[in-house]
Image (cartoon, grey):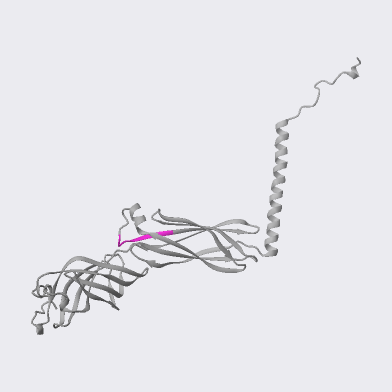
């Protein structure tokens, strides 16, 4: 075999496979980045041409439509602004109410509606906070107290060009945990006494057990003396009862002596008389209007007559 037919020493040239793979990856990576830049550029041009933009939202107010001893009804007003030329759907609303980092309640509202094109709309998020649930979970939360809260809301919307977006919101405030007032019927002062009719004034002591003021504007009540119902009334009354304070008020009542029989004479002799009183007070508070129960069973009160009717008037 001639020398020209001999293979060259070293055979095929050496290939650095790792280096080539790296170069291929760099070329491929560069291609992906170019595609991403192209898509973003197209999206930006569409946004500029058609007028698409990201919606905005804000928690504008927190309302307490109803508060009683069992629960607080809370409504959060969320203002959502849609700058786009088409409606955008609210896919989900996630909410959380916490106090000092502790969860009080959370929930999800699916398919929460649609925000019309180029408009601003208020979305209402209703929440029922049951007091027994939080008091059983957190023993330090007591009736009559005020607790801080933070409400967190995630609005999930679907916007063309941008896709699915989450708008996080929050707002802080305070929630009352109301306590029913303590009452005591200290005495019953007779104004008119006859065999057919008795007109009296109930001397009522009302103690506010809450860490917030109560502005009384009305009450209803029924009274039992010696297990006999002597009636009641539904009155408009105005009084301010400061937080953890006490107020006194006079409540008129009329009843017939013959309904009592001999028990009435025992009462008029100055003996302590058992009573029961039930009703409600209507009050305004810094958190809104409340209707709170008043209830006292097994109490003892005194009956007094006017001086002209032969009784003493040393109470006044």
Q: Residue at x 70, y 64 (%)?
A: 49
Q: Residue at x 22, y 66 (%)?
A: 296
Q: Position of residue 66 (x, y in %)?
A: 39, 67
Vertical position of residue 10 compared to residue 150: above or below = above
Q: Is residue 62 left or right of residue 246?
A: right
Quarter of the image where one finds residue 291:
bottom left
User: How many labels sit on residues?
Assistant: 0
Residue found at the far top of this picture: 1
Vertical position of residue 34 compared to residue 229: above or below = above
The region drawn magenta spans 143-150
Does 305 appear in magenta? no
Which of these two is toward me, 200 or 248?
200
Q: Main secondary structure of the magenta part?
A: strand
Q: Position of residue 79 (x, y in %)?
A: 52, 66
Which of these two is toward me, 166 or 282?
282
Which of these two is toward me, 215 or 258?
258
Q: Residue at x 13, y 75 (%)?
A: 261
Residue found at the far bottom of this picture: 308
Quadrant of image for the C terminus: bottom left
Does 148 appear in magenta? yes
Q: Is residue 177 left or right of residue 127?
A: left
Quadrant of image for the N terminus: top right
Quarter of the image where one finds residue 53:
bottom right
Which of these two is toward me, 30 or 35?
35
Q: Is residue 304 left or right of residue 60?
A: left
Q: Position of residue 46 (x, y in %)?
A: 70, 60
Quarter of the image where one finds residue 63:
bottom left
Q: Is residue 2 left or right of residue 224?
A: right
Q: Position of residue 255 (x, y in %)?
A: 19, 78
């Amino acid at each position: 075999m001639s020398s020209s037919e001999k293979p060259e020493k070293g055979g095929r040239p050496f290939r650095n496979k790792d280096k080539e793979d790296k170069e291929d990856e760099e070329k491929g990576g560069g291609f992906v980045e170019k595609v991403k830049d192209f898509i973003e550029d197209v999206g930006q041009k569409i946004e500029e041409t058609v007028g698409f933009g990201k919606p905005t939202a804000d928690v504008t107010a927190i309302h307490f439509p109803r508060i009683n001893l069992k629960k607080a009804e809370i409504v959060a007003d969320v203002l959502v602004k849609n700058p786009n030329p088409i409606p955008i759907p609210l896919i989900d609303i996630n909410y959380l109410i916490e106090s000092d980092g502790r969860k009080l309640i959370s929930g999800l509202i699916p398919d929460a509606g649609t925000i019309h094109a180029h408009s601003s709309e208020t979305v209402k998020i209703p929440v029922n906070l049951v007091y027994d649930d939080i008091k059983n979970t957190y023993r330090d939360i007591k009736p009559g107290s005020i607790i801080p809260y933070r409400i967190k809301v995630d609005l999930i919307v679907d916007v063309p060009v941008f896709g699915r977006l989450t708008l996080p919101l929050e707002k802080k405030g305070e929630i009352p945990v109301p306590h029913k007032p303590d009452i005591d019927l200290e005495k019953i002062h007779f104004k008119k006494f006859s065999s057919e009719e008795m007109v009296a004034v109930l001397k009522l002591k009302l103690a506010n057990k809450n860490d917030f003021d109560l502005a009384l504007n009305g009450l209803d009540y029924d009274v039992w003396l010696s297990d006999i119902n002597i009636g009641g009334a539904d009155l408009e009354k105005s009084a301010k009862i400061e937080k953890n304070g006490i107020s006194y008020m006079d409540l008129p009542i009329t009843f017939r002596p013959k309904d009592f029989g001999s028990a009435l004479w025992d009462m008029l002799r100055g003996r302590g008389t058992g009573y029961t009183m039930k009703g409600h007070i209507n009050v305004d508070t810094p958190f809104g209007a409340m209707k709170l129960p008043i209830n006292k069973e097994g109490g003892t009160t005194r009956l007094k007559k006017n001086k002209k009717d032969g009784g003493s008037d040393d109470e006044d």
